[in-house]
Image (cartoon, rainbow, N blue to C red):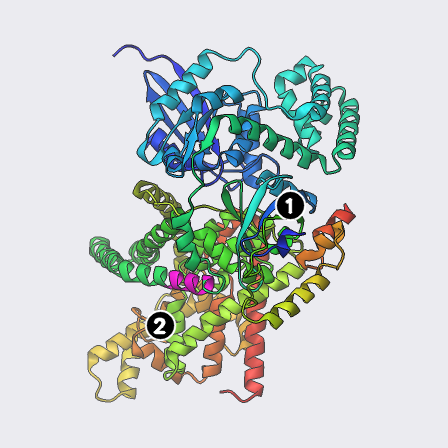
Amino acid sequence: MRLSEARIGQEFEILAVRIAREVGRRLADMGFTEGARGRVIRGGAFRGPLQVRIRDYDILLRRCEAAGIEVLPLGDLPAEGTVGPDFGFRFRGFRRRGSDGRGRREGGGRGFRGALGACGDREGPAAREGGS
Amino acid sequence: MSAPLPRVIRIALAGNPNSGKTTLFNALTGAHHKVGNYPGVTVEKREGSRVRGGRSFRFVDLPGTYSLTAYSLDEVVARDFILDEKPDVIVDVLDSTNLDRNLYLCLQFQEFGIPVVGALNMTDEAAAKGIEIDAENLGRVLGIPMVKTVGPRGTGIEELLDAVEARLEAPDEEPRMPGYGAELEAGIDRLRSLLASDPAFAARHPCRWLAVKLLEKDEHAARIAAGHPRGAEIEEAARESVRWIEGHFGKDSEIVVSEQRYGYIRGAVRETVRVIRKPNFSRTEAADKVIMHPLLALPVFAAVLWSVFQLTFLIGEYPMGWLETFFGWLARIVESALPGGLLKSLVVDGILGGVGGVFSFVPLIVILFFLLSLLEDVGYMSRAAFATDKLLHTFGLHGQSILPMMLGFGCSVPAILAARTLKSRRDRVATILTIPFMSCGAKLPVYVLLAGAFFPDDAANMVMLIYAIGVALSLASSLFLHNTVLRGEPTPFVLELPPYRAPTLRGVLWHVWEKSWQYAKKAGTVILAASVLIWALTTFPVREPAPGEADRRAAEYAADHPGAPPEEAAAWAEISRATSDLEYSAAGRIGKFIEPAFRPLGFDWKVGVATLTGFAAKEVVVSTLGVLYRTGLEETEESGTLKGALRADPGFSPRTAFVLMLLTLILPPCFASLAMIRAELGWGWLGFVVVYFLALGWGIGFAVNQIGSLAGFG
């Protein structure tokens, strides 16, 4: 699954960084490499940035960047609290709607392009890469 | 004392951000350092030295980076410094609590073929976290001597210098290089030997480093390799290797390189570092439960900001008062010492009035910088970026834009400087373009005067409204620019979140000193020039009063106000003379010349002149209006006479007053800010700022005035 879909407290192992070159490179430099293990600490309101602990330090990244990181969930799924605490941990219906919207924005598929489109802007990194 | 060894060791001090590099630099160099810029870029360069045993250790503090790609200006600067200056030794500062990621940069330095010494900094914190590092063994495994240091206490400084000397005295026969595994090494080796085939080229460029960079598809390296006599062959070989690696590993070759580098580090660390117990994040964790709580983060941020401004103005009031008193006293001394005439007017009104006004702002700036440096050193700024990124990103800005924007409420000059924390130029430009919308301290007196005169019942609310309009406009403008001239994505938000750390007083004070000095220098020189210019515009050409003019005016006044004491008539004559002088001066003529531009906004030439003088400093608008409305030369926003005079002017109404407040908010900022924008972004963007804010200010003023008058607002 993608890191952006992980729940709070979820431990994971990184499978691959699938995101446009420059950002992917930066994430790799910061320690997001295959096999590295980490944990999602918390997420900002209204789908704000994620706080992730990796290689014994904490890093903040936007969910659209996190959507380009393929992870393997480790251990049990934490029972409570998703990474989308846009009030969602209280109002279940609200969260479901939110996650549906997310799926659409990310272009549905799990493929390379789909993950890239997640940043939600007209001119996503995918478009730029396609152009170059 | 024996004759000192004529020996200078040039050392580049490198390391990750948050590795305690600056603190260690201060401990190494003491008070002997100077701050400048790297040539051609706005990246700060600190240099300092330490003399020991007749040997001078000259340190250059490289910008803190995580890697050496072309991701940010900082990385380019660090890389180019190493390549161009070829320092004797690179001392890499490592955060011992986070060795993997810190060694990642260290190994890239090793590839330059320049001796590297590692400073295992923050060993006290690592020990507290239960991390045990066998420094000697780690150094042996990597081929990089490691010395344990604790920056704030200065522990390990002498040992570090010993290691530097030892490294230079006994250079390696065959310098150790990080290994990338057999698959990559084949490619690296092939490229390296191709590059080394030309001795002249090999003497100038580190070949193995270039070979690795070519596998990372680094454009800078490709350009260097293109200068090789066998450039085409090398390019082809590099392309072939990259293709093979990507086929073999199934991912981008630069990702493979970085994964292999991390693999190499893992191997070295596994052998030499023992984690006795699980890393303990508890204190930071507990604080972050509140400070970074998804719902509380923004309110906490607002509270922090509010406290900073309250404290700044609360404490700053006293030294500001003292400075104002001091400059007033100085003006009186000069006034009595100099003979009357132009020189006196220049010194008292032009120089002391202008520069004195700016210097009385210095205490505010110093306190604001102190508090913000404190927050930065504690580690709060990353949290503030976390709290605000979602909001700002929506408008094409970045979480890290928040600090410069907030500083803008104090003064635009340091705010524009603070935009340097943003790594990409696009984000820096976008952030700097929001700053003029943040009503700075100098705009406040203008708002207070106009709101007090025309909205006496809601003065405070009107002022708040103008501030709010400024913030709203800044976001709307960012969104607009994001869709027009500043297309492209804001840089990804990938930001380290350091644990909370106790700041050192010395570090904070050093920050404050550096920033305040930059401010005083910039503002001092530009404001001096601007003050003199505005003084000259309002003074020349000098009007020769007609004979008996003063008596005539006094007589007129006496005739209009029967029973007024003669002193009042004399004062009126004096003010009246000043007004006529101003009208006659270049500024008055320019005001009349540009009057057609101000007409549609509902103003006559007087507002034009006031706006013009406002470019020296925004609060000058108030005193210019004071002169123009003949209410007195010593006009302040509190005094009632100017308010009365403005209300009595049939040309002014609540509507036009509101428009003038908007103009003060939106028209291009003062000269000092413009000079700062030029220094940071160049002439092109300066031109854009002037035109953009002129057009926007005029357009909004026009729209509000016309719509207001159609809707029947007075």
Residue B102 against residue B559 in the figure, above or below = above
Q: x, y percentage for residue B646?
A: 39, 80
Amino acid type shown at disc 1: Val
Residue B36 part of the magenta segment: no
Q: Is residue B304 magenta?
A: yes
Disc 2 chain ID: B
Mark 2 crowdedness (10 Å alpha carbons): few <14, some 14-19, many ≥20: many
Query: Along the horizontal axis of the image, is A82 left or right of B32?
Result: right
Point out residue B455 in the picture as x, y percentages from the top left corner: 40, 82
Specify whether disc 2 shares its chain with disc 1.
no
Q: Secondary structure at mark 1?
A: helix
In this view, the residue in front, B695 or B197, is B197
| Residue under numbered circle 1 | A23
Which residue is pictured at 31% across the width and 60% down the height?
B311
Is the N terminus of chain B in the top left, top right, bottom left or bottom right quadrant? top left
Circles 2 and 1 in contact, beta carbons < 8 Å: no
Q: Residue B163 got which mark?
A: none
- Residue drawn at 53 percent across, 34 percent down: B100
Label 2's element? helix
Q: Is residue B694 above or below residue B259?
A: below
Asked if residue B539 shows in the view, the reply is no
> What label does residue B626 carry, if any?
2
Q: Magenta region, mostly helix, strand or loop?
A: helix
Residue B556 falls in which quadrant of the image?
bottom left
Span highlighted in magenta in the image? B297-306
Residue B221: name its quadrant. Answer: top right
